Image: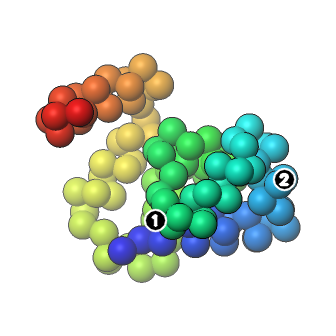
Amino acid sequence: MFDVLGRIKELREARGWSVYRLALLAEIPQSTIATWYQKNLCPPIDKLEILCDIFGITLAEFFLVGNTDELPGEQIELLKKWCLLSSSQKAAIFTIINAFLGK
C-alpha cells in the first residue's frame, strides 16, 4: 500500500520545510496536518491537490515514485487523466463516485 503521509513528509523534508511552513503555504491548519499523522489518516484528495501545487508536482507525480510496477496501469492512466480535469469536472466525478458508493 502506498504511504501517502510518508510521501508528504519526504517532499516536505526535501524542501527543508517544517509542518508549520507547509501548513502556511497550503493554507491548511497545522492541526489538520498533525491529525492526519496522529490518526494515520489519508488526506482528502482536494487537500492532496493543494499540497501537490505547493510542492510543484502533479497528483500523478505524487503517486508515481520509485517502483511504479506496484500500480496497475489503469490507476496510472486514471491519475494522469485526473490531472487534466478542471475543478468543476473533478467535482462532477466526485458526485458520480459518491452516487455509486451510495453516499
Task: Tell me how the rendering is colored.
Answer: rainbow
Q: Is residue 91 shown left or right of residue 95?
A: right
Numbered circle sitting on residue 91: none
Quarter occupied by the C terminus: top left
Q: Position of residue 91 (x, y in %)?
A: 38, 25
Residue under numbered circle 2? 21
Camera-nearest label, 1 or 2: 2
Location of residue 74 in the rendering, given as x and y in whole percent from the top left corner: 23, 57
Q: Quadrant of residue 27?
A: top right
**Circle 1 is placed at which residue position?**
64
- Image point (18%, 29%), residue name: 99
Looking at the image, residue 101 sits to the left or right of residue 91; the answer is left
Callout 1 amino acid: Leu
Amino acid carrying label 2: it is: Arg
Instruction: Quote the CA–CA distance across marks 1 and 2.
Output: 25 Å
- 18 shown above or below 26: below
Crowdedness near tag 1: few (<14), some (14–19) or many (≥20) residues, C-alpha within 10 Å: some
Q: Give the residue displayed 51% in from the left and 67% down from the top.
A: 40
Q: Residue at x 57, y 59 (%)?
A: 36
Query: Is disc 2 surrounded by few (<14), some (14 to 19) or many (20+) residues within 10 Å?
Result: few
Q: Quadrant of residue 50?
A: top right
